[in-house]
Image (cartoon, grey):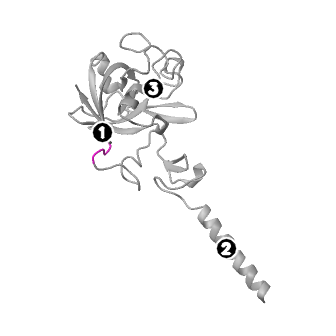
Amino acid sequence: MAKLACLVSFFFLVLSLLSLSQAISLCSGPCQTLNDCQGQLICINGQCSDDPDVGTRICSSGSGSGGDGGKFPPSSSDGCEAFGKLHCKGKSFPQFKCSPRVTSSTRAILTNNDFSKGGDGGDPSECDGKFHHNSQPIVALSTGWYNRGSRCGQKIRITARNGRSVLAKVVDECDSINGCDKAHAHQPPCRNNIVDGSNGVWHALGLDINVGEEPVIWSDA
């Protein structure tokens, strides 16, 4: 009987461990594989997070645990909707001709770009046809904010959640329509709320480039 009781206890222990291993995590929840995360979330560095390739905003919108919310909620669409989809890398990416309305504190997602020759920015910068050193505080803006080059050479002020800010010069477009080709370093189209900053921008803001994305606010300087 004692052996039977031990076997039964062991059986239930195994079932409990299996149920825990199959639990679906929400934002910032622990994970080991993609299947550990709910819905369109993916496993990044052991935590369930938004998929930067797809452009999900589940965690950063505050709809899941660990979302930013508060001072840096996601930007509203302001009637800016995707007009189509680009299919590449086995995924579907929305295409935008517009971006949310620019205000004195426009909410955006800061990403990192290599503006040097051979970097992940692809071709030379749209504004001047040149490559740039990544130590410079420079940015590319989503198609709508780039506005056919109207902000080329102008400065914008970017502020991070830690309170630090930096003035950065607009030198390029973060194309929200085209992508997945050589001109775009085979990267998918940008989302419509991206400020794609150089290493110089990230360092000035005191942010960890390895994080990949950070909510920020920006305005024309």
User: Residues at badges 2 and 3 in contact (C-beta under 8 Å)?
Assistant: no
Q: Which residue carries the number 3 mark?
A: 113
Residue 198 seen from this side: no
Res. 77 mark: 1
Most foreground residue, 169 or 69: 169
Locate residue 214, reporting x and y percent.
39, 39
Q: Residue furthest bottom?
A: 1
Q: CA distance from mark 2 to mark 3?
A: 48 Å
User: Residues at badges 3 and 1 in contact (C-beta under 8 Å)?
Assistant: no
Mark 2 surroundings within 10 Å by alpha-carbon count, few (fewer than 14), some (14 through 19), many (20 or more): few
Locate residue 36, reporting x and y percent.
57, 54
Locate residue 44, reporting x and y percent.
53, 45
Tag 1: residue type? Ser
Residue 81: in magenta span: no
Describe the element under mark 2 as helix, strand or loop.
Answer: helix
User: Residues at badges 1 and 2 in contact (C-beta under 8 Å)?
Assistant: no
Tag 2: residue type? Leu
Locate residue 192, reporting x and y percent.
36, 32
Describe the element under mark 1 as helix, strand or loop.
Answer: loop
Q: Which residue carries the number 2 mark?
A: 13
Tag 3: residue type? Asn
- Residues in magenta, as a range: 71-76
In the picture, the quarter occupied by the N terminus is bottom right
Q: Is residue 150 left or right of residue 3?
A: left
Of label 1 and label 2, which has the lower sequence position? 2
